[in-house]
């Protein structure tokens, strides 16, 4: 009378399940970070080397094409695994950038004009140039090329910090140049959200209905990506940073905090803002950056400088494992499918994505970039706009929309790490070597 109950599916035996073993990755990651940290000063000063570059090479060495000790694919889709790691590393780096930026310098008229130009015309030119490279070299169609271009637009704050922070950078580079690169790299990670979302919407076909413009789709993009994710992130971050600053001031008046607590406080704020941003559906990186700025600018300069330096050390702790993980997860097979187009794409990005636009604007419209007042400023800021963790985050976020996105972006990041890591020390030295104005003179206000 009654149908027999369906037979439940057989479960795999426990020993057949893929183990999620962290022992070897922890050992390898810890050993690499310790080795690089122990010789960090020498690595920074040595031409052709950098911490991220060495971590990337270490990941390649222990990965599937090297010794085969570690394969991130055993844990699942590499891009999916990279997303939370990249987001956390990016957030920690943005907090460090925010804590370093001095309010008097950043809010000055010349710096605001410089920052506005870098985040406006230069950023849009970088998007167009990067999309053109993806279209002309990789052969991607319109919106697909635009998505790749938008993902590599952000100048990475974590890699940029390796160039513009620390004693070596302060010795050779003026504060106005260092702060311009830092502030831009902090802000444009979140401001890239509307560009990436626009390209993804165009690729999905929601911006056009046949041959006609879909104004409803454009309206949805503006409300969601511009107003909610970008503007909303700035407001959420500023609110969280203001509340954190008020709490910290109250604690300091009661003498309930100390130097060790400040680092924990900044890290906890980073995590809390990331969580709030996720719950509210706003851009996490942009919210973290504004929260850090709001917190830092309500503290004493000495406290901000000390926290910024401590935060830089924390950056290295998170940054190096991410690049080691990337080295082990590089999609060599997808790169091989690109053929000659792959290396040509990476080289083209380095040459046309950023340097021409910074130099041309600074040379012919000097009022737009007053902080980059000399030719050497424009050349240095134009070259050092590295592609890094921010691009990895966007590629991991949208890789399901475009299969070519992950291999194209990882190729761009690898090329940037190789090129900028190899040139950081010599070009930083060269900045003021033999110049007619003599060594760099940095005022206390600039620092």
Image: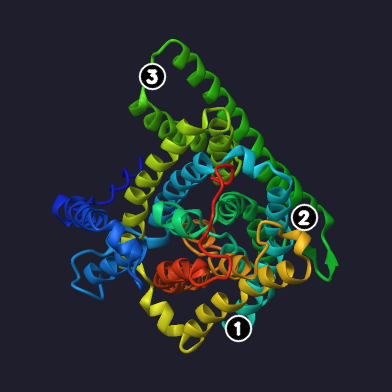
Against 301, is 381 above or below? below
Picture quarter with the N terminus: top left
- Label 3 belongs to which residue? 257
Q: Nearer the viewer, residue 390 or 383?
A: 383
Q: In the structure shown, which secondary structural element does the residue marked by tag 3 occupy?
A: loop
In terms of sequence position, does the residue under pointer 3 or pointer 2 come before the other? 2
Separation of residues labelled 1 and 2 (CA atoms) = 26 Å
Rounded to the nearest angstrom, the CA distance separating label 3 from label 2 is 50 Å
Residue 139 - label = 1
> What is the residue that sits farthest to the bottom in this orientation?
340
Asked if residue 151 shows in the view, the reply is yes
The residue that appears at 66% across and 45% down in the rendered structure is 230
Q: Which residue is mark 2?
A: 217
Above-or-below relation of 108 to 10: above
* Residue 326 visible within the image: no
Q: Are marks 1 and 2 in contact (CB under 8 Å)?
A: no
């Amino acid at each position: 009378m009654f149908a027999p109950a369906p037979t439940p599916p057989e479960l795999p035996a426990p020993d057949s399940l893929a183990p999620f073993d962290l022992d070897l990755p922890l050992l390898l990651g810890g050993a690499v970070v310790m080795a690089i940290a122990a010789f960090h000063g020498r690595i920074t000063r040595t031409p052709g080397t950098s911490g991220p570059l060495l971590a990337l090479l270490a990941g390649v060495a222990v990965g599937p094409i090297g010794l085969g000790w570690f394969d991130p694919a055993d844990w699942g889709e590499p891009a999916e695994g990279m997303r939370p790691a990249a987001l956390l590393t990016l957030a920690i780096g943005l907090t460090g950038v925010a804590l370093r930026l001095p309010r008097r310098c950043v809010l000055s008229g010349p710096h605001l004009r410089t920052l506005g130009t870098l985040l406006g015309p230069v950023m849009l030119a970088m998007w167009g140039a990067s999309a053109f490279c993806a279209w002309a070299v990789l052969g991607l169609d319109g919106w697909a090329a635009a998505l790749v271009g938008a993902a590599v637009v952000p100048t990475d704050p974590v890699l940029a910090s390796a160039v513009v922070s620390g004693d070596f950078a302060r010795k050779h580079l003026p504060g106005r140049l260092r702060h311009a690169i830092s502030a831009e790299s902090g802000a444009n990670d979140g401001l890239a959200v509307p560009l990436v979302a626009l390209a993804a919407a165009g690729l999905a076909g929601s911006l056009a209905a046949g041959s006609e413009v879909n104004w409803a789709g454009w309206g949805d993009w503006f409300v969601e990506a511009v107003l909610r994710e970008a503007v909303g992130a700035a407001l959420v971050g500023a609110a969280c940073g203001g509340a954190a600053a008020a709490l910290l001031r109250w604690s300091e008046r009661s003498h309930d905090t100390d130097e060790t607590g400040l680092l924990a406080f900044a890290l906890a704020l980073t995590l809390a803002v990331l969580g709030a941003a996720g719950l509210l559906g706003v851009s996490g990186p942009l919210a973290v950056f504004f929260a850090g700025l709001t917190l830092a600018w309500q503290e004493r300069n000495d406290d901000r400088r000390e926290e910024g330096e401590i935060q830089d050390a924390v950056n290295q702790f998170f940054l190096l494992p991410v690049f080691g993980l990337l080295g082990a997860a590089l999609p060599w097979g997808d790169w091989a499918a690109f053929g000659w187009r792959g290396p040509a794409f990476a080289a083209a990005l380095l040459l046309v994505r950023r340097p021409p636009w910074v130099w041309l604007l600074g040379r012919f419209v000097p009022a737009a970039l007053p902080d980059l007042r000399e030719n050497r400023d424009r050349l240095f800021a134009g070259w050092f706009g590295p592609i890094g963790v921010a691009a990895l985050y966007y590629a991991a976020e949208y890789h399901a929309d475009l299969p070519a996105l992950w291999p194209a972006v990882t190729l761009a990041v690898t090329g940037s790490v190789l090129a900028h890591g190899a040139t950081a020390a010599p070009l930083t030295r060269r900045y003021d070597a033999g110049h007619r104005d003599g060594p760099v003179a940095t005022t206390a206000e600039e620092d």
